[in-house]
Amino acid sequence: MPGRGPLVRRTFAVVGGGAAGLYALGVSPGVDTMAFIVLGLATAAALALGPVMNGAPRRPWFIISAVCVLFAVGAGVRPAALAVTGWQVALPDLFVLPGYALLFLGLGMLLHRREGVRDLHATVDTLIVLLGVASLSVTLLALPASEVVGRPLWLSLASAVYPVLDVLLLCVLVQLWFTSTQFTWSLAALSAASTALLAADFVYALLGTRGILQAPHAVDVVFAVSFLLLGFSALHPSVRLLGVGGRRQVQAWTPLRMLVIALALSVPVVLLAMHPSGGALRLGLAAAAVLGIGLLLLRATAAVRALGRAQRVTEHEAAHDALTGLPNRGYVDAWLQRRLGRGRALTLLFLDLDGFKLVNDSYGHATGDELLRAVAGRLRAVAPQRSVLGRLGGDEFVLALEQNDRDPRELATDFLSGIDAAFALTEADVTVTASVGIACSARPGRPAPTGQDLIREADTAMYRAKALGRGSVAVFDDSMRSSVRERLDLEQALRQALALDELSVHFQPVVALTSGEVVSHEALVRWTHPVRGNVPPDSFIGLAEETGLIVEIGDWVLDRSLEVLAARRAAGAGSLTVAVNVAGRQLVDPLFGGRVCAALHRHGLPPSALKLEITESAMLQEDVTVTHTMDWLVGAGVALSMDDFGTGFSSLSYLRRLPVAEVKIDRSFVAGMVDSAADEEIIRAATAMAHALRLSVVAEGIETLAQRDLLAALGVDRGQGWLYGRPVAFDAYAEAGSVTEPSLSSMTASGRTVGTGSS
Ligand code: C2E
Ligand code: MG
Ligand code: MG
């Protein structure tokens, strides 16, 4: 059906237009009647079909279609009725008057469906217009028509009724316009059809006041045009919007609307001035004028109230978080400030979900939002009375309350218990924990903090809690303040490190234990800060991970390492490889694998030239992207190595499942090996286990020959450590050449080697 729109429209244009044209010619009363009936039926068909085709509500249009049939029959029988009875009314009115009733019903149904129709402002505006037009029509048309002498009373009444009905019709249309948010051709055509109807009726009513019953044929042609327009209105695709409408945010008085309303208001007053006599009429007009002013006042009051309401909504929105409906940072801040200003002692709990980013990354933001809403709901349920629960943004919630006798840690534990149970979300069941930081405003020996201070302190304590592990609670104390400042300073400096060229890459050789041949290098990042000096990776890699800076730093280290390797290979070290450390944060980036391959390609190196060292915990992150990235890299030919083996879960089942080619035994075991039989046993078992899975084994931190010999005896394949060389910069390393057997002369009496490079 929807595809037939153009055909139906064309058919209506031919049949309806043809009939209207024939009617306009005015050949004879018989032909006119036939033509009008055909036009009426064609319009009725258009009114029934158009809305169905265009997906508009059907029932109102079926009713208007029936109206059309009634109007057509009424108009069709009028010439005949006039010829037979001498009065044109009576018989046609039997069809037309019920037609009007149905028309109001149909249009009323359309209006009823509109969202903005119950808007008080639109209705009052419409009533003001109604008052003006009704005064005009009663004074100029209805009263004179009813006063024509020599006509039966019922006939005079009927003549007076039409202009009034048309006024009502006009008001319905005005209401349709007032509740529309956009221009539609359908409404324009409907209005034009009604205006044509109104104009023709007006002429008839005007003639009627002079006792003339049959208008010139041209006036009847206007009725035919009105039908055509009505048909077009129903066939146009925008007919769908007629039953929809929309709510205007504010029913503002546009200049046009103001003009219409001003004119409508002035009508009764002007008419009153024009009719110095006629008691009942003057009384009616005066009443209309007073009513108009009353409506205007109502409109003004309603507008002020609406403005107040809108302001309250805006204020609420400004102080609350759109996602959860909880008070936002501004609100919480103001609340704290007010209480602290009155000298109240407050406790603030700062709660941050653990691993929320993982939920977002794995299931998408919609699920993340769903989780935040659910968490907000649970926290709301457990928040104590007279406390304020707010969301500061992201996964950060705060609970502020007056300091009471309860231990804040206990309070935090109760608060956390709210999110203990798993959340059944649309995508998955998710279990979350959170870290809570607590700050109390009343602490001996310190001035009262501001609201923002308190939030900052609780935030700091929350970071401490995070460091203690999932689901921890920490209370702020002054010792945290300096560590926080230091952390912030370091973060700031690290952000600039890359741009200021303060980072470099050092290389440490990895050798085959039995032959002593250098088979690879591990690339290790170095940061030389102008004031802080050499900052060890252990003090900034974690920070870089937390802040996300590791992505940029890691990319840079990879690129620099491959550049050096390419140069070394070009200089003759044909089969040399490089091992680059990769942080967990880099692996959750779906584009990481692609960037690794692009870097290899950029430096003309095969994937086999690179090994990526990943710690066990980074490999086991709860994120699907990590598994995908690792599989993808291995598929592309890049080998993966499990770094710091023995410090994490170190489970055989994980080793079997993960796509690694190598295990790097953590240097703590190597250091403890000579004195501790347990460490030696661990290395022996790990090596046997790895070999059973066809993985090669590298030992880190070999500092002495004794360690080297023992490791070789345990079957470890390769080794790395100060015994073979410290991590050194590219140039120094290039000069040093490849390391083979360490020379005994470089050994101290205690059996430790003296480093050959700078660390
Ligand atoms: P790692 O990957 O286990 O690197 C080995 C660490 O052991 C290096 O520390 C190295 O200097 C040190 N080492 C090597 N041989 C010996 C030895 O004989 N005795 C002792 N005591 N230490 C030895 P470094 O360079 O301080 O790096 C520490 C950690 O920082 C690395 O541990 C690695 O996890 C991380 N890291 C370093 N560079 C990067 C990087 O570019 N990206 C990422 N994501 N992490 C890096
Ligand atoms: Mg490593
Ligand atoms: Mg390691």
Image (spheres, grey):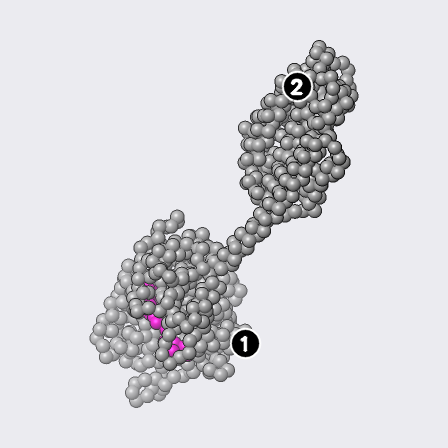
Please tell me in which quadrant of the rendered image residue 294 appears: top right
Q: Give the residue displayed 69% in from the left and 13% down from the top.
A: 81
Label located before the other in sequence (1 or 2)? 2
Disc 2 marks a residue whose amino acid type is: Trp
Q: Give the residue displayed 71% in from the left and 20% down from the top.
A: 19
Q: Where's the C terminus, which quadrant?
A: bottom left
* Mark 1 neighbour density, 10 Å: few (under 14) some (14–19) many (20 or more): few
> Which residue is more in the foreground, 348 or 604?
348
* Mark 2 neighbour density, 10 Å: few (under 14) some (14–19) many (20 or more): few
Residue 637 can be seen, yes or no: no
Question: Which mark identifies residue 500?
Answer: 1
Residue 435 can be seen, yes or no: yes
In reply to whether residue 470 is colored magenta, the answer given is yes
Q: Is residue 207 left or right of residue 406?
A: right
Please tell me in which quadrant of the rendered image residue 696 appears: bottom left
Question: Which mark identifies residue 175?
Answer: none
In reply to whether residue 307 is colored magenta, the answer given is no
Disc number lying in front (1 or 2):
2
Assess mark 1: CB under 8 A from ligand 1? no
> Which residue is more in the foreground, 507 or 1?
1
Query: Is disc 1 placed on a helix, strand or loop?
Result: loop
Q: Give the residue displayed 72% in from the left and 23% down from the top.
A: 147
Q: Give the residue displayed 23% in from the left and 79% down from the top.
A: 675
Q: Give the residues in magenta.
A: 467-482
Instruction: Please say if 579 is above or below 727.
Output: above
